[in-house]
Amino acid sequence: MSRGAGNWQPVVMPGAETFEIASARTGETYRILVRVPAEPAPARGWPVLWMLDGDASFPLVFTQPAHGLFPPASGVSGGAGVVVAIGFPGGAPFDAPARSRNYTPTPDSETGDSVSSEFGGASDFLYFLTQELRPALAARLPLDPGRNTLFGFSYGGLFTLHTLIAHPGHFQRYWAASPSLWFSKGLMMRRMRDTPPVTDAQCLVVTVGRDEQFPTRPLPSARMAHLARRAMVDNIREAAGLIARANPGLRAELIVAADHDHFDMLMHGARRVQAMAFGGDEAE
């Protein structure tokens, strides 16, 4: 089919490759997108940024990263590292049923999700990430086992905090963008209030858009009631405080972004998380 004038070419992202891999643990197949720096790896191997919702988040890492929060690491040229984005077959930016299956902990009450019907696979999905996918990549690329950053948005942010607290040791740095803490009637909030959320992580950033609970423009009453029920800003503020108080040695930051709604926080985080993942280590 003719597309008119010009020499049309496929769009190629520098250093990007993709493949699919099946998990024996979850029984699912995942689409993996990888960006590898062009320069030689540091002596310890590349730090790795693991990004959920891969088909939505991966293109955003090609925007200019912001290095304001974390300086470049010694031995890591220009703060560079490997990006591993985990998506689902078909390449849809958001696969709602797959996200709810893989990113949520086991619910103990009504989920509050009116779209999906399967939940609770977070532990199995974490096993796939750390025990199946990570060794497969380490067999092909020099990776630093002590510099792993996990980035997740929405349900992916819920998975990120669940991993931070319930399954410590697999990552050292975490970025939870607008985590869905309303899930299962605030399951994670209830757990953190009952038991101090102790973690061995080095760094944590938790973000939320102020408009997710307090929109700057009037919205229909039903939408306003929905935002009030989910209380994204209030819950995320409280969660960040609970985690910080339980872990005085953790380098933690809460960001409430003015004039940002829920989906804004994906772009907000994807640009900035590279600085945390590939920036300096306070221990160095």
Image (cartoon, helix red, strand yellow):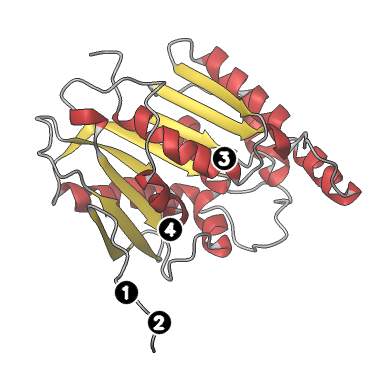
Q: Does 66 sit left or right of 247 as displayed? A: left
Where residue 59 sits in the image (x, y, percent)? Answer: 40, 52
Q: Which residue position holds label 3?
A: 265
The part of the image, by quadrant, that contains residue 4 is bottom left
Q: Does 283 sit left or right of 140 as displayed? A: right
Q: Which residue position holds label 2?
A: 3
Does residue 137 appear in the picture of this structure? yes
Structural crowding at the residue carrying mark 4, measured as other residues with C-alpha within 10 Å and reported as few (<14), some (14–19) or many (≥20): many
Q: In the rendered structure, which amino acid carries the disc numbered 3?
A: Met
Structural crowding at the residue carrying mark 2, measured as other residues with C-alpha within 10 Å and reported as few (<14), some (14–19) or many (≥20): few
- Point 37% across, 62% down: residue: 30
Q: Secondary structure at mark 3?
A: helix
Q: Nearer the viewer, residue 229 or 41?
A: 41
Q: Is residue 200 above or below residue 113?
A: above
Q: Which residue position holds label 4?
A: 55
Q: Secondary structure at mark 1?
A: loop
CA distance separating discs 1 and 3:
33 Å
CA distance separating discs 3 and 2:
35 Å
Q: Decide: marks 1, 3 in contact (CB < 8 A)? A: no
Query: Looking at the figure, which quarter contains the N terminus?
Result: bottom left
Q: Secondary structure at mark 4?
A: helix
Q: In the rendered structure, which amino acid carries the disc numbered 4?
A: Asp
CA distance separating discs 3 and 4:
16 Å
Q: Secondary structure at mark 2?
A: loop
Q: Does 66 sit left or right of 14 as displayed? A: right
Q: Does 135 sit left or right of 84 as displayed? A: left
N-term-proximal mark, 3 vs 2: 2
CA distance separating discs 4 and 2:
26 Å
N-term-proximal mark, 1 vs 4: 1
